[in-house]
Image: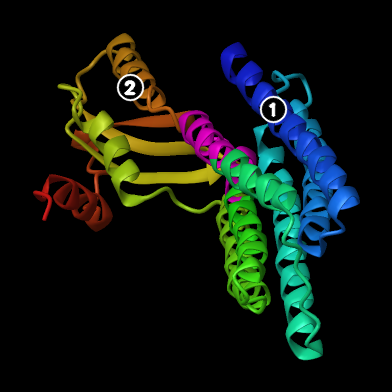
Amino acid sequence: MSASRRSVLRRVGLLVLAANAALVIAKGAVWWYTGSLAVQSEAVNSLADSVYSIVTVGGLYLTTRPPDFEHPHGHERIEPFVSLFVALGVFAAGFGVLFQAGRAILGGNVAVTRNLAAVAVLAATVAVKYGLYRYVAGISKEYNSPALYATAIDNRADVLTASAALAGVVGASLGYPLLDPIAAVVVGFGILYTGVEIVRDNVNYLVGRAPPDDLRARIIRRALVHPDVEGAHDVIAHYVGPEIDVSLHIEVEGDRTLREAHDIETAVIQSIQSIKAVDDVFVHVDPKELGEWKHDDEIDRLIEADERPPE
């Protein structure tokens, strides 16, 4: 792992923690001033976000440590576990929103403040959380970080919860207080779906899911583009944590010297490893005259799909 990736992930984790802590203070102050139940629930939500942000910062510190004797491939495989912890927080928030909304609807006790301070803090929360979502999602994609992606998705869910609370406050001002719990029910189910997304993605990382077809096609093309590679078979690419390990066989002319075969192997490895998501690459060189080559329908399918013009 590069020093730049290490510093960026840690910096973003601290930024999210600082933002959540600031929102706890702001919402807590407005709740104390107005007594708004909507702001109170949002303050509790931000407090929970701050707690998981501390865990995320600690997890990112662990995952970004350099390789050592006991972990020669680094510590990135911890990241999916950090993401699953974030998913627990998302599920808790979703069920909490549904519980509060259901109790308000069934009990007929819908009390929402009309204070402008509540509107201001909730509107600011929507803006801050949306900004965090866009920024963290971009960083998570650029640096291939499941933990930051889960954090981004959680911030997207927070945009929905804060919007629901804001709708309740504005709805009460317009004489429609039931807008608050009705919107909260919709948001609650949306949050739970977000939790399912996070769990699904990170369980796939943990069980060694194959990468998407377009990425697998790129890997195969990196091998076949070498002028001395006649074919490839037994191509296996799978996630090990957030990164991809690749193994494959390539066929070359059997009269190549050992040094030439080594140079071909090295060039193919370096070419595939230049793909950002790829970590380790293992290449076995076969003399094509030995007849070890076998037709691989999966390779043909991927290459054909990759060459197909976009619809």
What residue is shown at x 76% (from left), y 30% (from top)?
18
Mark 1 crowdedness (10 Å alpha carbons): few <14, some 14-19, many ≥20: some
Q: Which residue is mark 1?
A: 15
Near-viewer residue (243 or 99): 99
| Amino acid under disc 2 | Ser
- SS class of the residue under badge 1? helix
What residue is shown at x 52% (from left), y 33% (from top)?
135
Quarter where residue 50 is shown: top right
Placement of the C terminus among the 4 image quadrants: bottom left
Q: Position of residue 127 (x, y in %)?
A: 57, 42
Quarter where residue 125 is shown: top right
Left or right of 265 in this view: 227: left
For the residues labelled 1 and 2, the Cα–Cα distance comes to: 35 Å
Classified by dominant secondary structure, the portion drawn in magenta counts as helix
Residue lying farthest to the top in this orientation: 259
Can residue 138 be seen in the rendering of this structure?
A: yes
What residue is shown at x 84% (from left), y 54% (from top)?
34
Left or right of 203 in this view: 245: left
Q: Which residue is mark 2?
A: 271
Q: Position of residue 228 (x, y in %)?
A: 18, 22
Q: Residue 123 in magenta?
A: no
Q: Position of residue 107 (x, y in %)?
A: 81, 88
- SS class of the residue under badge 2? helix
Mark number displayed over residue 7: none
Q: Residue 134 in magenta?
A: yes
Q: Is residue 49 above or below residue 41?
A: above
Magenta segment, which residues?
131-153
| Amino acid under disc 1 | Leu
Quarter where residue 95 is shown: bottom right
Q: Is residue 115 above or below residue 11?
A: below
Q: How is the image coloured?
A: rainbow
